[in-house]
Amino acid sequence: MLMFQADELIKIRRDLHQIPELGYEEVKTQRYLLKKIAKLPNQYLTVETWRTGIFVHVTGRDATRTLGYRADIDGLPILEQTSYEEFQSLHKGAMHACGHDFHMTIALGVLSYLAYNQPKYNCLFIFQPAEEGPGGAKPMLESAPFRRWKPDQMLALHIAPEYPVGTIATKVGLLFANTSELFITLKGKGGHAAYPHTANDMVVASSHLVTQLQTIVARNVNPLDAGVITIGVIKGGTKQNIIADTAVIEGTIRTRSIETMKKIKKRIESLVQGVEVGFECTITIDYGANYCQVYNDKEVTEDFIRFAEKKESVHLIICDEAMTGEDFGYFLEEIPGLMFWLGVDSQYGLHDARLEPKEEAIPLAVETIIDYLNS
Ligand SMILES: CC(=O)N[C@@H](CCC[C@H](N)C(=O)O)C(=O)O
């Protein structure tokens, strides 16, 4: 058997699409990937698992340099609503809605080529869990296998539903934002719906807080800078005629700079104090997982751009930065490298239950990365 061909890659993507697992629960995914890797000739490969992730080291002809390639492997808690009839998620309520099934398949495709064709330099493939949270990049970066095989350069891609197949988009410098998760719990006094004067209603308090949080970006962030506060979850109460004693707000904060992130958090804390006083309740804040920005190295990215410009099958776009987050940023904090967007042309975007990326992008990406590694 030779490297995985286009039809096999599509099958791999569909298999992986059916078994999405949340961060650090990627047990079946890890088993599946290990099985595929075990089918490859092992002359140049050394495989090591790390929690639910995997490192694969490929020995090159010249061991003076190592190139790192990272693919994230976790899914999202989304009930799939695609038109796929034959390969929808078998894990009800979980979905590969951020393209990690594509990311893994592309990494396997490149790896399968290198298993048959020894690369010039060493390569390190990193199949990383928990990108959507709580974050796998930082602990993997600090792990023993990574320190032993530490790459000199890092590369990763992310699918981009808004671009046609064949498009690669990237830029020098900031590509993705600094992010912080946000979990706020409000605790007050519940009671009978007919006796509001005896209780502190946490549904009302949390509603006020959500509205106040929206003023931070509108009124505290310099309009020439940028910030995002999205509240994705608001939960409170148990029954329509019971005043809620607890409410929970969950969201995410995005900024272009660390300073703005600090400023936003300070404002959140002040507003929370105000709601505590105003509604006579207790509020706790937990910032969950924080990711640093994705910052593409100038030299490596310019070199990649020159390569992509020359490649006929690629339409290169120099894009703007986005407020998405990615813990791949931690690799780039320590090692020069880049991330790029891969066009997959879906009507529905990332984190949408209807995301349907076009599979033709997979063999194209595999071929492009192989060419880049050989360039
Ligand atoms: C590419 C992408 O969609 N990444 C996620 C990363 C999530 C980070 C963290 N869980 C958070 O919500 O802040 C994103 O939502 O941008």
Image (tube, helix red, strand yellow):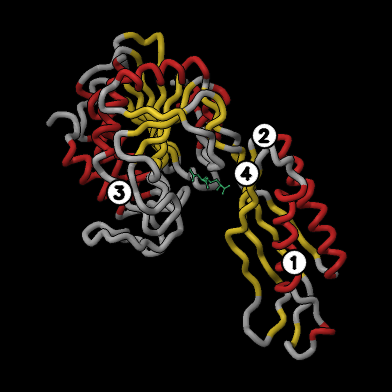
Q: Across the whole image, how many numbered discs are drawn on residues? A: 4
Instruction: Give the alpha-carbon distance from disc 2 to disc 4, as whole Å.
Output: 9 Å
Q: Which residue appears farthest toward the left when viewing the image?
A: 1
Instruction: Give the alpha-carbon distance from disc 3 to disc 1, as whole Å.
Output: 42 Å
Residue position marked by numbered label 2 in the rendering: 257
Instruction: Give the alpha-carbon distance from disc 3 to disc 2, as whole Å.
Output: 35 Å
Indicate the secondary structure of the residue bearing disc 2. Answer: loop
4 vs 3, front mark: 4
Q: Which residue appears farthest toward the front when viewing the image?
A: 224
The first of marks 3 and 1 along the sequence is 3
Q: Is residue 49 visible?
A: no
Q: Nearer the viewer, residue 204 or 118?
A: 204
The first of marks 1 and 2 along the sequence is 1
Q: Which mark is residue 16?
A: 3
Evaluate if marks 1 and 2 touch, with contact meaning CB atoms under 8 Å apart: no
- Whether residue 150 is situated above or below residue 353 in the rendered picture: above
Residue position marked by numbered label 4 in the rendering: 254
The first of marks 4 and 1 along the sequence is 1
**Which image quarter holds the N terminus?**
top left
Q: Amino acid at mark 2?
A: Ser
Residue position marked by numbered label 1 in the rendering: 208
Q: Determine whether, in the image, residue 76 is placed left or right of residue 254.
A: left
Q: Determine whether, in the image, residue 65 is placed left or right of residue 233.
A: left
User: In percent of the image, x 84 and y 84: which residue is there?
Assistant: 197
Q: Amino acid at mark 4?
A: Arg
User: In percent of the image, x 52 and y 30: which residue is there?
Assistant: 141
